[in-house]
Image (cartoon, rainbow, N blue to C red):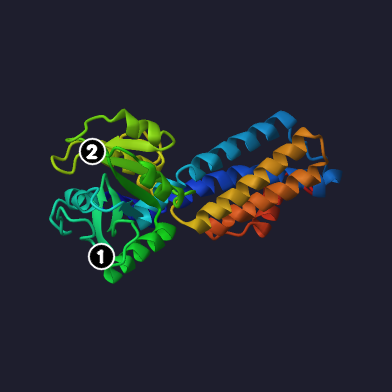
Amino acid sequence: TEVSLQAARGRLDGVFSSKVKEIKEALLRLLVHLEAELDFSEDEVEGLAVEALLEGLVNAGGRIERLLATYEEGRAIKDGVRVLILGRPNVGKSSLLNILLEQERAIVTPHPGTTRDVIEEAINLRGVPIRLMDTAGLRDTDDHAESIGVRLARERIETAELILFVIDASSVSFNEDMEILKSMEGKKVIVAANKTDLAPGRLEAKEAFSGHTVKFISALDSTGMEELKDAVYEEAIGHPYGAFSEASPGDLVATIRQRDSLVKALDGVKGARAALEQGLAREFIATDLRYSVDRLGEITGETTTEDILDRIFSGFCIGK
């Protein structure tokens, strides 16, 4: 998508790396001062004030946390999101797929069990690449081909990142739907209450699925489709569509490796802050800071051991 392209360009231009380098540089300045105090105490290096050290740690920790908060959005834009359309037979799953694709990709008939295989197609939803998967209706069946489709549908639950659980809003009871929903525990689920042209705004559906996001739609006349798309975007990205974001696409954390290094760097900053607030020796603070700087270096590809010594000798009156 266009947004994916912007993110890729930003990464190639070093936009994300520059953000990490800024944080690393701020921590490195603190570390250099601490190392100078510890290793060259005989040269009477002026100690860094507790207030200044704490301010630096709080600021760096906040900047790392803001970067980490972009991971869901960055990963979704870079790799796309696998969205599984699931539900009982004849609730309108294939009709929903066709509307989202804006083409007749899946066969739609009034007869339950029409879809036998998993149908996969990609769409651009608000700039996010989405891989849609339409599946066979979940039910017990003696039909061999349909039973294979049901099995494939259940297997896709494990790999799906978001589930569009389609229900019939005109239904008298949602007991079967609730039983199916139990198999999705731990998954992101949006309940698409279809057939509102037959039963508009059913309060029963809202009450039955009160623990989930419920969107009322009609696959017959496309009612509620924009609201459903907004809900899919918000679940995939982590914030509402159109919400103001300080980060540009190139600023976003896009890989697990980047996220893990940032998490470890944040742990180091938190450890240094805890040591400072507990009044521990500055060796402990320096050790945690060095760990954070090294973890940020994993992202930028930089090492800092020699750099620290160079900075100490250039920035302080050591041995003069």
Q: What crowding class fits label 1: few (fewer than 14 Cα within 10 Å), some (14-19), or many (20 or more)?
A: some
Give, as a three-letter code, the residue at label 1.
Arg
Q: What crowding class fits label 2: few (fewer than 14 Cα within 10 Å), some (14-19), or many (20 or more)?
A: many
Give, as a three-letter code, the residue at label 2.
Ile
When asked about the image quadrant of residue 310, the answer is bottom right
Which residue is at a point 54% across and 40% down the rendered structure image? 65
Residue 164: where, in percent of width, then height? 33, 48
- 31, 70: nearer the viewer: 70
Residue 120 lies left or right of residue 65; in this view the side is left
Which residue is at a point 75% across and 43% down the rendered structure image? 285
Answer whether residue 28 is visible to the viewer in this image. no
Look at the numbered discs 2 and 1 and tell me whether their residues touch, using CB distance below 8 Å: no
Mark seen at residue 217: 2
Asked which secondary structure carries label 2, the reply is loop
Mark seen at residue 289: none
- Residue farthest toward the right in the current orientation of the protein: 42
Mark 2 against mark 1, which lies toward the viewer?
1
- 33 shown above or below 87: above
Which of disc 1 and disc 2 is earlier in sequence? Answer: 1
Residue 257: where, in percent of width, then height? 52, 58
Residue at the disc numbered 1: 116
When asked about the image quadrant of residue 294, the answer is bottom right
Which residue is at a point 60% across and 39% down the rendered structure image? 61
Q: CA distance from mark 2 to mark 1?
A: 24 Å
